[in-house]
């Protein structure tokens, strides 16, 4: 069933009135805006090095010998931490969003097919889903990431291919429930093809839990990407990501704590924002709490 613009506007208003949703949306919007406008809000190249001896480990709010201002200081190579933090947001959030899109696409396809087409195919798909759910994801991530040359594309693929099972289970349950609804049975009785019924009548009404899972999944994927990059199995230097920035600063936590704490704080803020936004969306979209 189509939703009106007024209904969508009311939902957005309710979401922003929820402190969790408002905080999560605000943090994510600020981070996304900085990432998109990175050339405008930073000094330029995140890998740029000047006079390393004169510019390494400059403290926050300092100016180097060339007159460049460093709001969060510099790292061991004299690179501006703020610039790397903003460009790292592009990588970390981009990886998180793309990985979740991959996992959602796979999960929706598997869950929809298993929920609407009964028989051996559904049994096989559900068995595959349960088997994949039983595997420890972190161990699987480390194994897959260690088998190939680390790269951003590999991280996206690995996170996407190991995160679809929960979505498949959600969609499977929604599709099975909706398939027994009168409007679906009516469409079938009128001669509509099963694939058309699934695409036009069932899936649009089954995506509510998927939206919530996507918001929560982005934060989880960003955290996992940071973990892989921290271990050297994800995004490789000099390309900045929050994970490898934390790794590069772990040996200087006493003398130059800003190198690791800045990306660490950004990571925590974004993951918490995704979690709060997901919780607010769940309360908003749950029929049990909607007015």
Image (cartoon, helix red, strand yellow):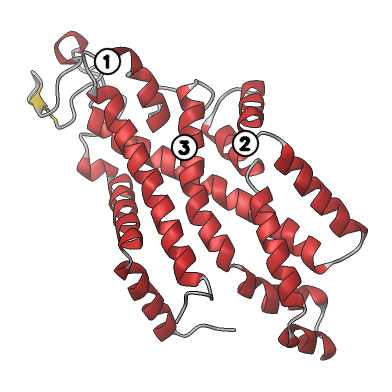
Residue 97 shows in this picture? no
- What number is the disc on residue 77? 1
Q: Does label 1 or label 3 sit earlier along the sequence?
A: 1
Closer to the camera, 67 or 193? 193
Closer to the camera, 191 or 228? 228
Label 1: how many residues lie within 10 Å, few (<14), some (14-19) or many (20+)? some
Query: In the visual, does 15 lie left or right of 135?
Result: left
Closer to the camera, 190 or 22? 22
Tag in front: 3 or 2: 3
The image quadrant of residue 145 is top right
Q: Considering the numbered disc 1 on the image, is that residue within a helix, a strand or a loop? A: loop
Residue at mark 1 to residue at mark 3: CA–CA distance: 26 Å
Q: Considering the numbered disc 3 on the image, is that residue within a helix, a strand or a loop? A: helix
- Which residue occupies 78% across, 89% down? 186
Q: Which residue is mark 2?
A: 158
Determine the residue located farthest toward the top in the rendered image: 53
Query: In the visual, does 86 lie left or right of 278?
Result: left
Q: Which residue is mark 3?
A: 223
Query: In the visual, does 214 lie left or right of 65?
Result: right
The image quadrant of residue 264 is top left
Residue at mark 2 to residue at mark 1: CA–CA distance: 31 Å
- Which residue occupies 36% across, 25% down? 245
- Which residue occupies 18% across, 13% down? 51
Q: Are marks 1 and 3 in contact (CB under 8 Å)?
A: no
Tag in front: 2 or 1: 2
Q: Does label 3 or label 2 sit earlier along the sequence?
A: 2
Q: Does label 2 or label 1 sit earlier along the sequence?
A: 1
């Amino acid at each position: 069933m189509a939703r009106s613009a007024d209904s969508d506007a009311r939902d957005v208003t309710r979401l922003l009135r929820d402190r969790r949703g408002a905080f999560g949306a605000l943090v994510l919007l600020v981070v996304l805006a900085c990432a998109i406008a990175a050339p405008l809000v930073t000094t330029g190249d995140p890998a740029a090095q000047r006079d390393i001896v004169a510019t390494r480990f400059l403290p926050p709010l300092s100016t180097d010998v060339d007159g460049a201002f460093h709001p969060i200081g510099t790292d061991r190579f004299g690179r501006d931490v703020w610039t790397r933090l903003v460009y790292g947001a592009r990588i970390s959030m981009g990886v998180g969003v793309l990985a979740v899109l991959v996992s959602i696409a796979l999960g929706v396809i598997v869950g929809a097919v298993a929920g609407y087409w009964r028989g051996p195919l559904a049994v096989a798909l559900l068995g595959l889903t349960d088997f994949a759910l039983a595997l420890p994801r972190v161990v699987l991530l480390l194994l897959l990431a260690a088998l190939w040359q680390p790269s951003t594309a590999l991280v996206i693929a690995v996170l996407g291919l190991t995160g679809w099972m929960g979505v498949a289970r959600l969609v499977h349950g929604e599709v099975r429930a909706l398939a027994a609804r009168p409007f679906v049975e009516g469409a079938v009785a009128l001669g509509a093809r099963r694939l058309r019924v699934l695409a036009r009548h069932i899936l649009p009404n089954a995506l509510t839990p998927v939206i919530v899972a996507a918001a929560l999944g982005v934060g989880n994927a960003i955290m996992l990407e940071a973990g892989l990059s921290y271990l050297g199995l994800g995004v490789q230097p000099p390309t900045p990501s929050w994970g490898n920035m934390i790794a590069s600063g772990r040996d200087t936590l006493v003398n130059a704590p800003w190198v690791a704490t800045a990306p660490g704080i950004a990571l925590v803020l974004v993951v918490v924002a995704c979690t709060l936004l997901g919780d607010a969306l769940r309360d908003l979209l749950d029929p049990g709490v909607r007015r």
